Amino acid sequence: MRSLTSFQRQRHQLTIFIARLEDDVQRLQDTAKVLEGRIQSTQSALERAETSWRETAERMRVYQREHAGVPRSSLSNDVVFRALTSSLTTYRNSMRSLRDSLAEQKDLLDDVTTTQQQIITAKERERSTLASTITKSQQELQRLRSNKETLLAELQKKQQSAQRVRSMISNLVARERQREEQRKRDQARTKSGRPSRESAREPARVERTPSAPGFARRSLPWPTPSTTLLQGYGTYRNPKTGTTLENPGIDIRAAVGTRVSCISKGEVSSVTWLPGFGSLVIVDHQNGFRSVYANLATVSVRQGSSVQQGSVVGTSGENIDGALVHFELWYGRDRLNPATYLR
């Protein structure tokens, strides 16, 4: 029998793959819109060229009728005749080029549409597999909850993952500080007239300004429609095992599939999976604060993507403690009680 960890890891991989497919579909939709616009523009240009060609051809016929019987040698040097002939050639070449371009654009649009449909089909197939995996994961959870030993083992995994999150946050802070220190060194070298080798190789990076003000208490929206806590911040005692555990954030009661939204704008710095924590997203709000959204059944964002307040980062899942969303808030390396900041 496959383990809960195996089901949850597969669920995470599927939801990340589906998110990438959705990105691909969106890009193809954008490409199709651009192509449709170009086709319409090319079609209009072709119609104008055809109209101009017909009008010029008619003027040529009129000119030839009016000059019937005039010696060819006189016509060959006639400015008007030469101008009409040149215009007809120009419009004919333009129409040929526009028709070729139009055919190529339509072929490309057909290819884009076909690829888009193939990806949509693949996405629906993966969604079906994901739904099956979630069901099996929930069944395995029920089995584990009925056994004290397996329940205790899962709770220990969850505590170990909490430490992993702390390490991840610490590494993110360290990298940010390294970038800031390097930026200051580069600035100092530039001011002294001795640019660093890094800045000599590439243009100086634009300093990022904070994209959100510092968060005040009771200033942030909840990440879920529900504001009911299943488990608060800090130490608590599990009634089934009798063990005392540490909750590094808050667990918000939420039915499986509930939309989970970002509390403020920022950048997704990590999308990963951890035992007991499920799919997990970390958002850097670029003002010293970072938020963590865990126990997600599906993920809707990718690492490096920008998010706004209210952007959906995923949907809620279920772990050994029930159907919930685990939410953490950090300032630098300091863990905060999220309930203090949620309004």
Image (spheres, rainbow, N blue to C red):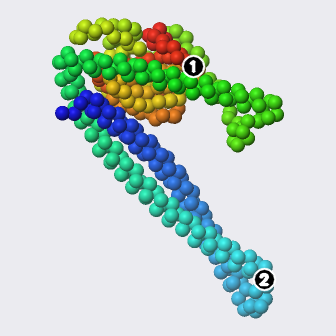
Residue 303: x percent and y percent?
A: 48, 34
Which residue type does callout 2 highlight?
Answer: Asp
With respect to residue 152, does 137 lie above or below? below
- The reply to whether residue 173 is in sight is yes
Q: Residue at x 48, y 12 (%)?
A: 336
133 to the left or right of 12: left
Q: Which of the numbered marks, if any, corresponds to residue 288? A: 1
Residue 60: x percent and y percent?
A: 67, 79
Q: Residue at x 77, y 91 (%)?
A: 73
Per the image, label 1 sits on a secondary structure element best described as: loop
Callout 2 environment at 10 Å: few (<14), some (14 to 19), or many (20+)? few
Q: Which residue is mark 2?
A: 78
Which residue type does callout 1 highlight?
Answer: Gly
209 to the left or right of 251: right
Per the image, label 2 sits on a secondary structure element best described as: loop
Identify the image quadrant of residue 254: top left
Q: Nearer the viewer, mark 1 or mark 2?
A: 1
